Image (cartoon, rainbow, N blue to C red):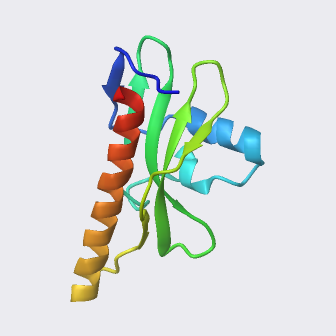
Amino acid sequence: MSPTGGGWRRYDHALFPVFHERFEEKWGEGTAPFLDPSVYDEEQPRPRAQWINVDTGAAVAVVPVWEDDSSARSFAVFYLPPNGGIWVLRPPGLSSYVEAVANGTSTNEEAVALRNDSFRKAVAHAEAFIYG
């Protein structure tokens, strides 16, 4: 099921709080620190991408996700249907990466390249879902 059609716009500002609200409503309080808008400041992981359908109110977001190990991350694609709920859209292929450490080593450059590649794949998956 693809939400194709007009009305989709990229929105590269603050993450919509409804992603966090619906995720925790479905999977429990404290399960989505990566979606909590109160912890998203300039030191939180980037990049992120977000779209909203101005006609239906649906939304899609690509965000870095982490659990216990904050250096090991992956990108997830979330879809908010206009009638409530939240879907996790799993991108095909590798979407995991290790957070780069600001020390200027080649390992850091490789980590940044892997993160950027993972992000591009997740965004391509989100755009294929949105635009068909």
Relative to the observer, which residue lies in front, 87 or 105? 87
Give the residue at the far right of this rendering: 28
Residue drawn at 61 percent across, 67 percent down: 67
Q: Is residue 50 visible from the viewing direction of this image?
A: no
In x, y percent, where is residue 27? 75, 47
Q: Quadrant of residue 131?
A: top left
The structure residue drawn at horizontal position 49% and vertical position 13%, both measured from the top left corner, is 56
**Horizontal side of residue 69 vs 109, given as left or right:** right
On the image, the x and y values in percent for residue 119 come to 34, 56
Which picture quadrant has residue 26?
top right
Q: Which one is in front, 129 or 32?
A: 129
Toward the viewer: 111 or 129? 129
The residue at the point 40 percent across, 40 percent down is 126
Q: Determine whether, in the image, residue 119 is placed left or right of residue 84.
A: left
Give left or right: position of 29 versus 123: right
Where residue 30 sits, quadrant-wise, is bottom right
x, y percent for residue 7: 36, 15
Q: Measuring from the top left, give residue 22's x and y in whole percent.
A: 67, 36
